Amino acid sequence: MDNATRSERSRNAALDAALAIIARDGPGRLTLDAIARESGMSKGGVMHQFRTKQAVLKALLERQMTHFAEFTSRYMATAREVSEQPELAAQLATVREASIQPNSAALGVLAAMVEDPSLMELPRAADVEIIKAIKAEASDPDLALLRWAAARGLLLSGLFGMSPLGKDEHQRLFKRLMDDSQWNALEKPVRQRAVKAAPAAKAASPRKRA
Amino acid sequence: MDNATRSERSRNAALDAALAIIARDGPGRLTLDAIARESGMSKGGVMHQFRTKQAVLKALLERQMTHFAEFTSRYMATAREVSEQPELAAQLATVREASIQPNSAALGVLAAMVEDPSLMELPRAADVEIIKAIKAEASDPDLALLRWAAARGLLLSGLFGMSPLGKDEHQRLFKRLMDDSQWNALEKPVRQRAVKAAPAAKAASPRKRA
DNA sequence: TTTATAAAACCGACCGGACGGTTTGTAAAC
DNA sequence: GTTTACAAACCGTCCGGTCGGTTTTATAAA
């Protein structure tokens, strides 16, 4: 087998094992030996691919982030045509995806912050951009942020094993969150914004009061 | 000094130290030795008050929960008069309170799940009751849940050091979240509910499409 | 093709330190 | 004087990281 792909396979095996451990035993049980055991490789092998445990966490974090970033941009392509706020729509869809996946979703984030809170800078920097984009395209930025926050709340509550919501309820809530027409009723535009080309998609903002 | 209060003081000192450690160094750095060092007491003293580390986490979790539960019921007394949904209002206020406090807010929850995810049963059970109450009093239960989820999203994002929102923005979003009149516009009552006394606040549900 | 050499991937024993928990001792409260 | 609160030394284990060695792949001269 090719050398590069051999490394690639090993790295991914280690990261997959890490996710499995976190999901099954909690972030506190994630050790290098456990990764070696779970992935079937030796500890030396793991240490060859990642010089330190923090490097494992960082790689895990980055892999998850690019994975979801890809999902987002893939979704955004279609979202541009159905929603006036494609960035928000794509974000909501991504968060829903992350919250649906069996276990290995945003767990890497959890493990990262446990071991080294400074690693959180990466996802935070990404979030800054996302929020900027969401606010830029919204006629009511605060409402858009609240929808975004609600999605994150559902996701994180689930991650923590704290969600008292059933699967059906979860699904229904996300569906409503993502349905623009449910929210235009209370948009409170602060300023007039330039609309790209399409004047409106399904329902133009009814613009209550003033 | 009285024996009982001496214990009480020690226990609280240990728990305060634990919170400080988690907030400063992350949940992964919470050790019994660290608690002893931070609180100024000896390790033996800590172990006398809590027979095991899990007992520390559990006590921490319970203390935080009762603290917030008290805040909630205190707020609810006033909330009954200003909102048609006092349970939701009180919950939102409590979550805001938790997210505002300097550091040591719901961090105990974080540490607990790291060390022993099964401890999450306690807060989850509490959440079940809260959600039940919120749904029971709402004419549009799903919307109420989404507002609740948004508050939690803001809180947890902040806890994770992931919140890219400024303090002013944070405050503004919570204010809007808690303002009932901002949300009535899109209530979609599934069934008619008995209203206490006031027939409606500012805007009655306009009831979009059927 | 074969052979020689280097480089990369991998293995598993090992080390020092930290961590959870125990034990023994002491002083204050009852 | 018995129980309770605390102190401090101590113990076995686990964990992150190192290290010497082996196998596999890459390169290139013969």
Image: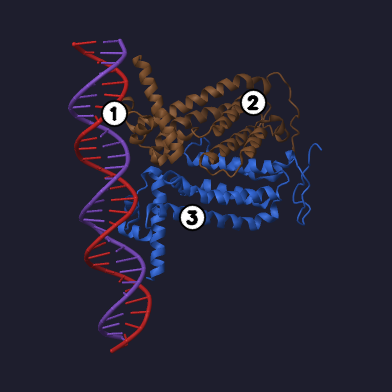
Chain colours: A blue, B brown, C purple, D red
Tag shown at residue B44 = 1
Q: Position of residue B88 (x, y in %)?
A: 61, 28
Q: Which residue is mark 2?
A: B85
* B170 displayed left or right of B113: right
Which corner quadrant holds the N terminus of chain A? bottom left
The kind of residue tagged 2 is Gln
**SS label for mark 3:** helix
Disc tally is: 3
**Nearer the observer, B4 or A209:** B4
**Nearer the observer, D10 or B145:** D10
> Is B85 placed above or below A95 here?
above
Which corner quadrant holds the C terminus of chain A? top right
CA–CA distance in space, label 2 to label 1: 49 Å
Q: Position of residue A5 (x, y in %)?
A: 41, 67
Q: Position of residue B159 (x, y in %)?
A: 51, 39
> Is D4 placed above or below A68 here?
above
Contact between marks 3 and 2 (CB within 8 A): the answer is no
**SS label for mark 1:** helix
The kind of residue tagged 3 is Glu
* Residue A47 placement: quadrant: bottom left
* A58 displayed left or right of B94: left
The kind of residue tagged 1 is Gly
CA–CA distance in space, label 3 to label 2: 42 Å
Discs 3 and 2 lie in a common subunit? no
Q: Which residue is mark 3?
A: A62
Identified at 31% across, 26% down, the residue is B45
Q: Residue furthest right?
A: A210
Number of the front mark, 1 or 3: 1
Graded by Cα atoms within 10 Å as few (under 14), some (14 to 19) or many (20 or more), the crowding at tag 3 reads some
CA–CA distance in space, label 1 to label 3: 42 Å
Discs 1 and 3 lie in a common subunit? no
> Is A186 placed above or below B137 here?
below
